[in-house]
Image (cartoon, rainbow, N blue to C red):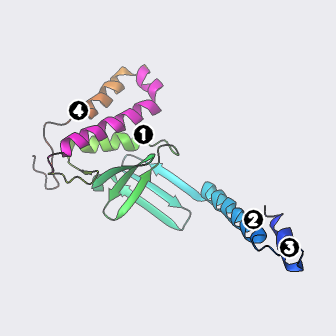
Amino acid sequence: MTLIVPSFIGEYLDGTSDDIFSVILPGLFTLFCYLLLLMGLFRRFGVDRDKVWTRFGKLFNRQIRFENVDRIDTGVGRFKVYGGDTKINIDYNRFDYTLVYIRLLEELQYRRIKVKNLDIDDPEWEGTAQAFRNSLARHAYQNHQTFYDAHPEELDRLQALIQPPKSYVNRAGSTE
């Protein structure tokens, strides 16, 4: 499109074509293609035991440490992880975020996190958190089914993370 768009501009400037959209639409399509190219080249996703991050070159960099996660939610084809004012979309169709699922399951084993706009003291929180645990574990298992089938001890560990804990530790360190 980069090679073709100048011919449309030339035709418009020469008066051969009087349709401005013959310049605008190919130009917008070319711009969109370059945007996709830049996203593919410079957008990076990552996760380790301590944090999850996303960045686009030097323009923006977001990261959330798992101990700072204060809210988790779902979206269309994604999970959303919040840490204060920072939000990271966990697009499970773009990147293998299984470690995020495991770390969130571990966090839900010892502390309450706001789930789907339900405060931690809401009576419906436990049921919603359990549905969220099941969803996270299902995605982890589906991503690595061969591994879990070959290592039943890890599958048992994953299933243990799905179970609600007997008590939670809040931020101050006391148990509920």
Contact? badges 1 and 2 (CB < 8 Å): no
Dot 1 corresponds to which residue?
98
Is residue 61 shown left or right of residue 123? right
Q: Quick one: 108 or 58, which is closer to the camera?
A: 108
Q: Earlier in the sequence, mark 2 or mark 4?
A: 2
The label shown at residue 163 is 4
Q: Amino acid at mark 2?
A: Pro
Q: Position of residue 127 (x, y in %)?
A: 21, 40
Q: Secondary structure at mark 1?
A: helix
Count residues near mark 4 (Cα–Cα under 10 Å), then give few for <14, some for 14-19, many for 20+. some
Q: Position of residue 44 (x, y in %)?
A: 54, 54
Q: Earlier in the sequence, mark 4 or mark 1?
A: 1
Q: Which residues are magenta?
A: 122-149
Contact? badges 2 and 3 (CB < 8 Å): no
Q: Amino acid at mark 3?
A: Ser
Q: Earlier in the sequence, mark 2 or mark 3?
A: 3
Q: Quadrant of residue 160?
A: top left
Q: Amino acid at mark 1?
A: Thr
Q: What separation in Å lies between label 1 and label 2 (alpha carbons)?
A: 40 Å
Q: Earlier in the sequence, mark 3 or mark 4?
A: 3
Q: Earlier in the sequence, mark 1 or mark 2?
A: 2
Dot 2 corresponds to which residue?
26
Q: Secondary structure at mark 2?
A: helix
Dot 3 corresponds to which residue?
17
Quarter of the image that includes the N terminus: bottom right
Contact? badges 3 and 1 (CB < 8 Å): no
